[in-house]
Image (cartoon, helix red, strand yellow):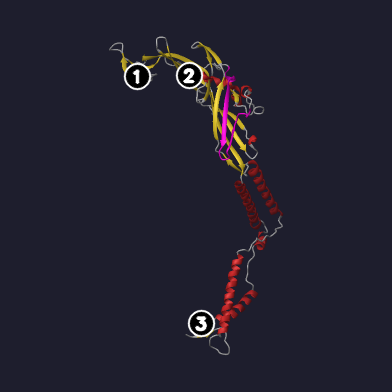
Amino acid sequence: MLTVIVHGRWGSGGVGCPPPADCAALAAHCCRMAGSCLKGRFLSLFDYKTEKYIVAKNKKVGVLYRVIQLSIIGYIIGWVFVSKKGYQETDEAIQSSVITKLKGVSVTNTSESGLLVWGPEDYVIPPQVKTFTQYVQTIRPLLETEISSLKLKCSVVFSSGIMSGRCLRKDENSNGTCEIYGWCPIERKFKPHRGPLLTNAENFTIYIKNFIQFPKFKFSKSNVLETSDDSYLKKCRYDEELHPYCPIFRLGDITQRARYNFQDMSTFGGSIGIMISWNCDLDKGYSHCHPQYYFTRLDISVSNTTIATGFNFRHARYFKNATGESYRSLFKVYGVRFNIMVHGKAGMFSIIPTAINVASGLALMGAVTFFCDMVLLYLMKKGNSYRERKFEDCRYDKQHRSTDAEFSFSFSKYLGFIHL
């Protein structure tokens, strides 16, 4: 093996090995440098680096920057936190129960049924809240044979009963008629009278008792006033300002709040939607959670051209005469149907949505700086001048290069060997 010194000499000889003392010193120097380097890299983890800001004396960009900043601050404070209550956690999974009772008495006197007294048990059809205002009555016995008037060789296209399978003929040469099972006579056509037969139906009252619960916050409440006065529900009527916790509504007032006249609506019937809304800010306390009522008619389309306007249904009453023969009174009823819908939302302060919305606002503020930088550097006439000051080129100084060369030469004096 031949060892040649490239950059210098050791002692007075031209070729040879460095003294052992110098090798040990060199090794110690290298170890110190390596340890210092590793220590410097470790300590640099705890350095804080901040950005360098350049103040641009440009009023247009400055005004734009402040306007956008104020807009974002107004949006976050006014819309997110004040209007939408972005600092609250919400619960929209409302649990609700509704109990209804309808009260009122009316009298009718018609040629079919004579004088009749109608109470809630007569005109309220459970389980949904309905009350009828018009009806037509057909009293008919149950006959085993009802002869249809169709003479098509014992074939029936339309029928009001079930065919027995028998064909009845006067003689062998005549066309027969089909025998059917059904009630006789058939339901007669009826055109409702103008106005309700139950004339005072608009003065009937409906009692709507509603219980709600928000399970996330373990909050529950009712739309009935919490009082020890037993006579309160007997004399109160709902009023948005005077009696907001009275759950008793007059039918005429309900249709009026839905912007319809009860007398006109009672002719062919209709469907009314009663919406109970619970929007509760639980940060304000139990007493600030109130029900709000909205009324609308549901069987009217926007174009008002539907043929399905109104509401009617049929029900029957059965009885037997003195001889034991079965009879049925069929009523085709026109009335008002009430559909009760409950919805709501509760909110309470929580640090999680608050932190998320604040962080979103700060991110938007950072976007303002980026946007104004783009305007300043690329859309302004002096964009080149601003770019020169914002972005600096890092050039290696000659003095630093010469110093590094001297260090490289002195260091290579000890390490520059060629090993063959």
Residue 333 picture location, percent across and down: 50, 19
Name the residue at 35% across, 19% down.
163
Tell me the number on the disc at residue 332.
Answer: 2
Left or right, 182 with respect to 10, comes to left
Give the Cα separation between the discs numbered 1 and 2: 25 Å
Left or right, 140 with respect to 249, comes to left
Task: Give the answer, above or below, for where 309 lies relative to 49.
Answer: above
Name the residue at 51% across, 82% down.
418
The kind of secondary structure element at disc 1 is: strand
Instruction: Give, as a three-letter code, the residue at label 1.
Output: Met
Res 119 seen here: yes
Instruction: Give, as a three-letter code, the residue at label 3.
Output: Ile
Q: Tell me the magenta residue range.
A: 200-227
Instruction: Give, as a three-letter code, the residue at label 2.
Output: Lys
Chain-order first, disc 3 or disc 2: 2
- Magenta run includes residue 205: yes
Left or right, 367 with respect to 167, comes to right
Residue 109 picture location, percent across and down: 53, 11
Chain-order first, disc 1 or disc 2: 1
Farthest top residue? 322
Give the Cα separation between the discs numbered 3 and 2: 117 Å
Name the residue at 45% across, 18% down.
316
Q: Nearer the viewer, residue 166 or 249?
A: 249
What residue sits right under mark 1 in the picture? 163
Task: Give the answer, above or below, for where 274 lies relative to 24.
Answer: above
Residue 250 picture location, percent across and down: 60, 23
- Magenta run includes residue 146: no
Name the residue at 49% across, 12% down.
113
What residue sits right under mark 3 in the picture? 418
The kind of secondary structure element at disc 2 is: strand
Binning the other alpha carbons within 10 Å of mark 3 as few (below 14), some (14 to 19) or many (20 upward) gives few
Residue 169 picture location, percent across and down: 31, 13
